[in-house]
Image (cartoon, rainbow, N blue to C red):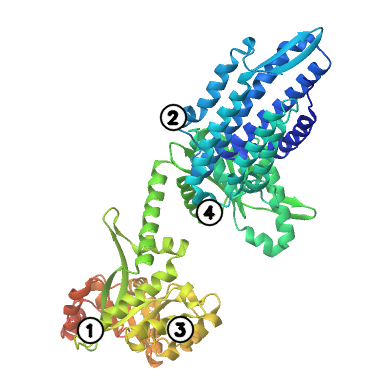
Amino acid sequence: MALNFCFEIAALVIGIILCIVSFSQYKITDLKGKVYVYMLRIVTLMSFLNLTAAIAIKRNLIFFLPISELVINLSLIMIVLLCFGLNLYLIETLQARNKYRRSTYVILAMPVIVQILLLLNWKKHTIFTLENVDERLLLSFDAWYIAPYILAMLSLLVYVVIAIKNRRIILEKKRNILFVIPFFVVAFYYLQYHFPNIAMIGFGHTVILLLLYLYAFHRSIKRDSLTRLPDGSSFKRMLDYRIGRQKSMTIAMITLDDFKQVNREYGYENGNRYLQLIANYIKEHAPKDSVSRYSGDKFAVVFDGKSCDDVREWCDELLSRFESAWEIGKLRHKLSACISLVEYPSMADSSEQIFDLLELMNIYGKRNKRNQCIICNDDFKKDMERRLRIASILNEVVNERKMHVEYQPILDVQANVYNRAEALFRMVDEELGNVPPAEFFPIAEENGYIVDVGYILLEQVCQYIRTFQDRSIAAPIISVNLFRQQIMDEKVDEKVAAILSKYEIQPNSVAFELPESVFLLQYEKVKEQVLRLHKLGCRFYLDGFGNAISDLSKLMELPFEVIKFNKKILKDAENNDSIYLLVSAMTAVLEESDKMILGDGIDSAHMKEMADLLFMDFLQGHYLCKPVTGDLAYAEFAKRDVFEVNAALDDLLKEIDIDNDKL
C-alpha cells in the first residue's frame, strides 16, 4: 500500500508553531494547561515519527523496518491516547482542582491499556503487517485494525456523557468549543479508517489542539501588557497547580512604596519605564519562569522547594539594590520596597490563604515605609488570622446591617442629669472576646467597610431614639461619629436625611462628631459638607480638640455646638499651671462664642475635679457612668440627681491649695 503523508507534514508544521507559542506559557499554566501541552508535544512528536516512517517505507530502507513498525504502533495508541487526554482536559476544565484521583486515571485510561495490550502482539500482525517483499516495504492492515477506533469511540462516549451532564458549567465558562470537539474527532477517525493509505490521524489531532488553543487554552493565559510578565490571575493558577501537586514552595511579594508619587512627579510614561526596569531586574535575578506582576506596583516570585530561610538571602540582595537610585535616562529616583514571604504548606494550605496573608503583610509593611523583609511565622499568622476574623465580623455587620451599640451617657453639669449620650460601636465575639475600637476601626477602613459602618450606626441610633418617642419619654441627644470617608461623600446629606426620615427623627436629635484631623486636608470641601448637613438641622461636636489644634478662626466659622476636650488636655492642665491657664483661657473664649465644652475621658475623681475647675458644660467618662446598652440606658437617662456638684467642688477647695490667680 502506497502511503500519502502530506497531511502529516501540515500537522508537523502546525504542531511546531503551537509548541513555540505555548513554550513560554508552560510554567504559568494550571493542570488543565499541562494536559494540553503534553498532548501537543506527543502529537507533534508522533507527526515527526510518522514522517520518518513514511520516508523509510517509501525509500525501502529495510534496516528501518523495526522502527517503522514501532512508529505505526505508537500512532495507533495515540488514537486512543488523545481521547484519554481530552477527557482529562474536560474534567479539569469543569473542576479546576489541579489534581486527579487515582480512580479517575485508572477508569479513563482503560481503553489505552487495552490498546497497549493488543499491540504487544504486533509481531503476530493482528492489526497491521509491514514486511519486506522483494526488497520492498509493504504495509497492509488486518481485521483488528478497527480495534483502536472502537476503543477511542468508547473513550469519546465518556467525554460526551461528562460534557452533557455538565453543560451548564461549560456554558457559564464560555467553553462551547468543548461540545464541538467530539464531532471533529469522529470525522477524522472516520476518514482515517476508510482511507488508511492517507496518514491524517496526526493532522486530525493537531487541528483539534489548534481549536482548543484558539477558543479555550490561550484565553486562560494572560500576560501584563507592560512588563510581559504573567498577571495576577496567572500567578494564582501557578500557585494552584503547585498546591494541587503538593509541591512545597515559598512565595515572595515585592511591593513598591509610594509608587504613585513617581507617577505624580515624573508622569505615567516615566512611571511605566521605572516599572519595566524593576520588573526586568527582578526577572533576571529570580528563578526562571517564576516572576509575575501581581498588580500595579506588586511583583510576585515563586521559589519551588525553598523555605523562607533559603529565600532570605535573595531578599536581602534585592533590598540592597533598592538602597540605590533607579535610573532611566537622566532621571534618578530612589524607591523603597517591602518583601513579604509566605511558606507553603507550613504557613498556608490554599492559594486563598496565601493571598490573604500576603495582602495583610503588605498592609503591615506600609505602616513603615522602608526597605524590609517580613516573614510569616506562627505569631504573625495568628495576628493575621485575628485580622481576618475581624474583617469577617465587619462583613457580617455590613451584610446584616446590625451591630452591637453601647451608649456612653454624657452629664449636663449645670442640670446634673444625663441628657446626652455618645453611641459607640462595640465588637464582641465568642472567639475573640471584646475587640477594642482602636483595632477594628483601622481594619474597617482598610477593607472599605467604614462608610457602611457609619450609616448602620446612625440607623441604629435612630431606631433607639424612636423607642424613647414610642414610650413618650424625652430622648437624649445622641452623638455618632462621622468618618472622613462619609463627610467627603457628595450625597452624605441626602443619605442622612433619608435615614432620619425613615424613622421620623428630628435632625436636632442627633449630633455628629467630627475629629479635628478631618479639617487638616481639604478644609473648604469639609466645611461645605458640614454646612449642608447643618442646614438640615443636624448638630455638630468637634471631637478630640487638642490632638491637632486647628486655626481658631476657622473653628469659629464652623457650626460646632460642643467642643470635646480630650483626656490628655485635662491631665496636662492638672500637672502644669501654664497649660491650665491656657486651657482655662480657651474655654472662656469658646464659651463667649456660644460653644459648649465637653470634658472627655473622665475616668477618676481627680479628672472630674479638674473638669469642674475649668467650668466645663458636659462631662463623659467611665468614672461618671460606663457605657450601657438598651434598657439599661433608660435608667441612667431617667436619673434626676447624678452628682452633688457644689458639694464636690467645696470638698475639692478644702483638700488642695489653689492659687488666687488660678481661681
Q: CA distance from mark 1 to mark 4?
A: 52 Å
**Whether label 1 touches label 3, CB < 8 Å:** no
For label 4, count other residues whose C-alpha is less than 10 Å away and answer few (under 14), some (14-19) or many (20+). few
Considering only vertical position in the picture, is 318 above or below 429? above
Q: Residue at x 70, y 47 (%)?
A: 228
Which residue is pictured at 67% across the width and 43% down the height?
A: 211
The reply to whether the C-beta atoms of the residues labelled 4 and 2 are less than 8 Å apart is: no
Q: CA distance from mark 1 to mark 3?
A: 25 Å
Q: Which residue is mark 3?
A: 493
The first of marks 1 and 4 along the sequence is 4
Q: Amino acid at mark 1?
A: Phe
Disc 4: which residue? 172
Circles 3 and 4, Cβ within 8 Å, touching? The answer is no
Q: Is residue 632 left or right of residue 397?
A: left
Amino acid type, residue under disc 4 in the picture: Glu
Q: Earlier in the sequence, mark 3 or mark 4?
A: 4
Tell which circle, 2 or 3, labels the residue nearer the N-terminal end: 2
Determine the CA span between mark 2 and mark 3. 63 Å
Of residues 24 and 146, the one nearer the viewer is 146
The residue that label 2 is drawn on is 103
